[in-house]
Structure formats: C-alpha cells, structure tokens
Image (tube, helix red, strand yellow):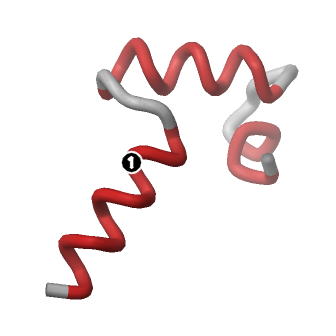
Amino acid sequence: MAVAFESGFEGLSHFHHSFKAAYGLTPLAHRTQASARSAS
C-alpha cells in the first residue's frame, strides 16, 4: 500500500489495476515469483 501512495496513485485499486496491466500479473503474484527466484 505504501508503494502505491508513494508512487502517486490515489488509491490501491488504481495501482493494482495499473500494475496488472503493465506486468501481466498482480503485485502479489509478482512478489511470489520474485521470492521464488531469489530462493533458488
């Protein structure tokens, strides 16, 4: 949530939608994948 507001988004929903449109997955899915890659 802090990232969304610090990035200038007015709401978490708008950030979530924009992130998914840009990266093709949700912020949570992105974190999960990044975590799995760094653990291997």
Q: Is residue 14 above or below residue 36?
A: above
Residue found at x 29% / y 58% = 33
In what quadrant of the picture does the C terminus appear? bottom left
Q: Which residue lies furthest to the bottom in this view?
A: 39
Say which residue label 1 marks. Answer: 30
Q: Left of 5 or right of it: where is 30?
A: left
Query: As shown in the figure, which amino acid type bears the numbered disc 1?
Result: His
Q: Is residue 6 above or below residue 25?
A: below
Splitting the image into 4 quarters, where does residue 22 fall? top left
Residue found at x 31% / y 27% = 23
Q: Left of 16 or right of it: where is 12?
A: right
Secondary structure beneath label 1: helix
Splitting the image into 4 quarters, where does residue 39 fall? bottom left
Q: Which residue lies furthest to the right in this view?
A: 10
Residue found at x 19% / y 72% = 37
**Residue 20 locus on image (x, y percent):** 44, 21
Q: Left of 20 or right of it: where is 35?
A: left
Label 1 packing within 10 angstroms: few (<14), some (14-19), many (20+): some
The total of numbered circles placed on residues is 1
Q: Left of 39 or right of it: where is 14?
A: right
Splitting the image into 4 quarters, where does residue 16 fall? top right
Camera-nearest residue between 10 and 38: 38
**Residue 5 locus on image (x, y percent):** 81, 39
Q: Is residue 34 above or below residue 17?
A: below
**Residue 27 locus on image (x, y percent):** 51, 41
